[in-house]
Image (cartoon, helix red, strand yellow):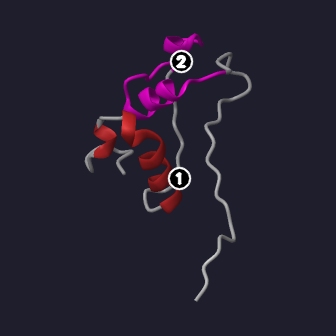
Amino acid sequence: MVTFPFAIDGVAIIVNPANPVDDLTQQQVIDIYSGKITNWKTLGGEDRSINMFTRDEASGTRAYSLKRCFTARLSSPMLTSSHPMAL
C-alpha cells in the first residue's frame, strides 16, 4: 500500500471587517481561546465582548489545530473537559 496526501485542510482566525482590530498575534489568539482576553477593548477595539465560533467538539480539524498551534504555549482551562471549548 502506498499512502499519499490528497487534501489539505485550512484553519483561519476571522475578525468582522467592521471591527477596527485588524491584526492579532499568536499570543493574543491564544489568550482569546484560553479566556484571558474576553473584550475587544483589550486589543484596541471597541468595548465589546468577543464572541467565538468554532467547529464542533468532535471535529478532528479543531482538535488538531488547537493542539498543534496552541498547546506548546497554552496552559488553560481549554485543555480540560469542563471548559466549553475543551479539546
**Residue closer to the observer: 49 or 2:** 2
Residue 42 image point, x, y percent: 49, 12
Residue 14 x %, y %: 65, 35
Q: Earlier in the sequence, mark 1 or mark 2?
A: 2
Badge 2 marks a residue whose secondary structure is helix
Q: Which residues are magenta?
A: 23-48
Disc number for residue 42: none
In the displayed structure image, the side of residue 31 where residue 3 appears, left or right? right
On screen, 51 above or below 81? above
Q: Magenta span has 47?
A: yes
Q: Which residue is mark 2?
A: 40
Q: Give the residue pinned by disc 1.
A: 55
Q: CA distance from mark 1 to mark 2?
A: 22 Å
* Residue at image point 42% right, 27% down: 31
Q: Nearer the viewer, residue 14 or 25?
A: 25
Q: Quadrant of residue 34?
A: top left
* The furthest residue to the right: 17
- What residue is drawn where x is 61% and y is 47%? 11
Locate residue 50, reporting x and y percent: 51, 27
